[in-house]
Amino acid sequence: MNARIVVLPGDGIGVEVTAEAEKVLQALAGARGYTLSFEHALVGGAAIDALGTALPEQTLELCRGADAVLFGAVGGPKWDDPSAKVRPEQGLLGLRKGLGLFANLRPVRFNPILADASSIKPEVLAGTDLIFVRELTGGVYFGKRGRSEDGTSAFDTMTYSVPEIERVLRVAFRLARERRKHVTSVDKANVLETSRLWRETVRRVSAEYPDVTCENMLVDSCAMHLIRRPASFDVIVTENMFGDILTDEASMLAGSMGLLPSASLAESRLGLYEPIHGSAPDIAGKGIANPLAAILSAALLLRYSLGLTDEAQTIERAVDEALRRGYRTRDIAQPGCALLGTQAMGDLIAELVAKS
């Protein structure tokens, strides 16, 4: 196995956590006897400072030629002007569009070892093991937008086509076949015309998967039930903005954003893998950021882009083992735990995977 991975550290703690994810991948590759080559490029605020754009063309071309992309985070106070024509977030949106990354996968699993890290009762969280499939290149984030000439009104347009909906639904149903065979499609069909089209498409596509149970749920109901009965969900599929909001809510089921990975997939095996947290400028450079979400994102990279399921599970088991032994970063610290910094946690996971 020889694979080419582009690393886009971005801004803030993205630089720190991607370094640890790369370290773990290298340790595993060395132990298993295959070769991973890593190339680094600029994106986000770092790219704006250096080249005046959040997504340089050379970065996009490098990613197009890669087997997978490992992404950190973008943004920070330095570029935090909502009226700016060039913003760090444009780099990530441009990558999604430019690479055709239409399906965002975000697994959420409750680890009883970290029961105290969540603000939700352990008995409510018990058995939670779900995955979101969020449509990533359509909807209101990519629709037409603007303001009136006098600046007193504004508009953002939500648009979806049947092919866009069909392809992300099929990702969700295929995933469900490998899991507990249940899909929850989330919309706002009682109000939005795009959601009515979404629901009609769900009805048709679900017929192609008779072995998978499918239910439709309004987004406000889903937001409530994620907190009330999270273990009842298996695969949740939804459009872009709803998925953005619901997945941040669901991150609290695991106790910290620092624990949750994500995968953004194209029609091909190319994918972009990133922790769901942001650039956290308040702790950037202090060596205390939690690298586990980035490391688990590297596991998803192995699974979905390189087809290395056993190696992906090796990383996931190593993370579980480190937590079982009582090692923690500051965001998930508990009384009596062994507190580690960003680099030390990465070193520990790398050591565990190398010995596996």
Image (cartoon, rainbow, N blue to C red):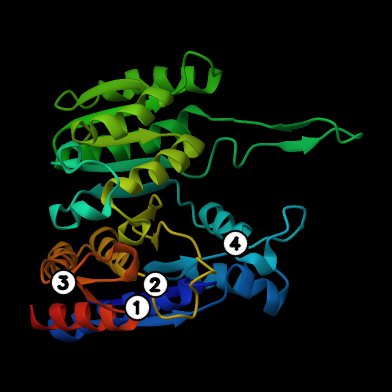
Work out which quarter of the rendered image holds the N terminus and state it.
Answer: bottom left
Give the CA separation, mark 4 to mark 2: 22 Å
Q: Based on the displayed image, in which of its 4 quarters is residue 181 positioned?
A: top left
Amino acid at pointer 2: Ala
Amino acid at pointer 1: Thr
Image spot of residue 113 (x, y percent): 14, 57
Residue 351 lies, with reference to residue 158, above or below; the image says below
Q: Which disc is residue 91 wearing?
A: 4
Residue 14 lies, with reference to residue 140, above or below; the image says below
Task: Answer whether residue 54 is visible to the viewer in this image.
Answer: no
Disc 2 is placed on an element classified as loop
Q: Which residue is mark 3?
A: 322
In percent of the image, x 24 and y 35: which residue is there?
Answer: 230
Image spot of residue 297 (x, y percent): 32, 63
In percent of the image, x 72 and y 61: which residue is there?
Answer: 86
Q: Which residue is mark 2?
A: 289
Whether the residues at callouts 3 and 4 have beta carbons within 8 Å, the answer is no
**Precedes in sequence: disc 4 or disc 1:** 4
Q: Which disc is residue 342 wearing?
A: 1
Disc 4 is placed on an element classified as helix
